[in-house]
Amino acid sequence: MLAGPAAALDLALPPIPAPCAAQGPGFAALGGTHTCLRIGGRVRAEAGTAPRRPGREAPSPVGASGRLSIDARTPTELGPVRTFIRLHGGAPER
């Protein structure tokens, strides 16, 4: 087998967004604008077994849900403008 020296690739990486410390933790500047953006969420899933009843098929207790939140803040001449969106969905537990 032949082995040669490894050469680093010269890749231009995008700049890391500057944090928007004045808006709080988790906010980052949206490139090319004065807008600070924070994206968050959670996912929850549950599964288990239920005791069988004679003559009936017991449903298995399975559930899942999720939430996505987007918070954008932009300074304007009239004052700060905040846009907040929260989406929630999922299947209820049985």
Image (tube, rainbow, N blue to C red):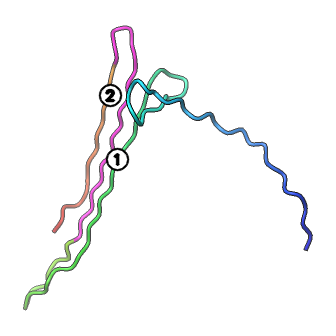
Q: Which mark is residue 19?
A: none
Q: Amino acid at mark 2?
A: Thr
How far from the left and from the top, in percent, is residue 14? 64, 36
Residue at horizontal 78%, vertical 43%? Answer: 10
**In which quadrant of the rendered view does residue 3 lie?**
bottom right
Please give left or right for residue 17 compared with residue 74 in the image.
Answer: right
Q: Quadrant of the C terminus?
A: bottom left
- Judge the density around disc 1: few (<14), some (14-19), many (≥20) Cα neighbours within 10 Å: few
- Residue closest to the far bottom: 54
Along the polypeptide, which appears first: circle 1 or circle 2?
1
Image location (x, y in percent) of residue 47: 26, 72
Q: Which residues are magenta?
A: 62-80
Q: Magenta stretch: residue 70 in it?
A: yes
Callout 1 secondary element: strand
**Residue 55, percent across and down?**
7, 90
Which disc is residue 83 wearing?
A: 2
Q: Main secondary structure of the magenta part?
A: strand
The residue located at (14%, 81%) in the rendering is: 58
